[in-house]
Image (cartoon, rainbow, N blue to C red):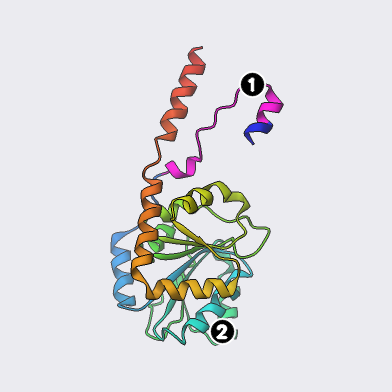
Amino acid sequence: DKKNFQKLTNQEIFDYGNLKSAANSLKYDEQKLNHLSLQIKDRKIWLAASTHEGEEEIIFNIHQKLKNDFNNLLTIIVPRHPERADKITSLAISKNLKLTKRSLNQTIENQTDIYLADTMGELGLFYKLCQITLIAGSLIDNIGGHNPFEAAKLNCCIISGQFIPNNQEAYQKLLAADACFIVENETKLQELVKQLLLDEKTTNLKAKNAYNLVNSVDDLAKKIVNKLDEIIKF
């Protein structure tokens, strides 16, 4: 992009990095966090955040297979578009999975397989609740992936699929810092989630590396404001 802008304008282009890494952490309600934690108790949990059509089926397949290893497993899904909740619910029913829906204030029970967080503005709550987090929009092509820095700021161990052209730079930085996993397919994702559910040390290390990376970034916004001030004065 920088090279293209230089060709277009024939002027120097200033690039200070990805502003998403400089954004504040997503907010969450401590009382709601405690309420959910009490319902989940000591169950094994993982999160699929910002899922799109086609990805929930992959998540459900993985959940069914992982139940053979973790009979108390709870999978939490935050769809990118909550209005798809009914379709996701129907898919879960077709796979004989018990789904609990947040928009209906349903309680997570011992038999709940899938907790569908079909509400708006609560992603920070679920990043805080679930350390093992798949950033979806990356398991199937033509979506582009989603911003991983929000999860990193809330101490998540980040997993992504391979289809991330819109967030390539962010993931390159995370990979260089040993701060995320990128999986090639459904089988690899299942194997990795199983490994992380068993290996708390690795999960914590990856989460710590991601957290340290996003919190060591210089104040990009301040640099940009200073440059604008300099240009305007000139």
Q: Quadrant of residue 94?
A: bottom right
Disc 1 to disc 2: CB gap under 8 Å: no
Classify 114 as above or below 223: below
Q: Position of residue 143 (x, y in %)?
A: 64, 57
Q: Earlier in the sequence, mark 1 or mark 2?
A: 1
Q: Position of residue 18 (x, y in %)?
A: 51, 41
- Which residue appears at 45% of the width and 26% of the height? 225
Give 211 or 77, whichever is nearer the viewer: 211
Kindly identify which numbered label has been placed on residue 11.
1
Kindly identify which numbered label has been placed on residue 93.
2
Give 208 or 71, whichever is nearer the viewer: 208
Look at the image and say whether residue 222 sits in the magenta stretch: no
* Image position of 34 (left or right of 135): left
Look at the image and say whether residue 20 sits in the magenta stretch: yes
Q: How far is mark 1 from mark 2, CA to CA?
A: 58 Å
Q: Is residue 105 visible?
A: no
Classify 7 as above or below 165: above
Mark 1 vs mark 2, foreground winner is 1
- Amino acid tagged 1: Gln
- Amino acid tagged 2: Ile
Give 97 or 31, whichever is nearer the viewer: 97
- Which residue appears at 57% of the width and 75% of the height? 187
Give 87 or 25, whichever is nearer the viewer: 25
Q: Quadrant of the N terminus?
A: top right
Q: Position of residue 108 (x, y in %)?
A: 38, 78
Kindly identify which numbered label has been placed on residue 21.
none
**Secondary structure of residue under mark 2:** helix
Q: Quadrant of residue 86?
A: bottom right
**Secondary structure of residue under mark 1:** loop
Residues shaded magenta = 5-23
Other residues around mark 1 within 10 Å, as few (<14) / some (14–19) / many (≥20)? few
* Image position of 202 (left or right of 55): left
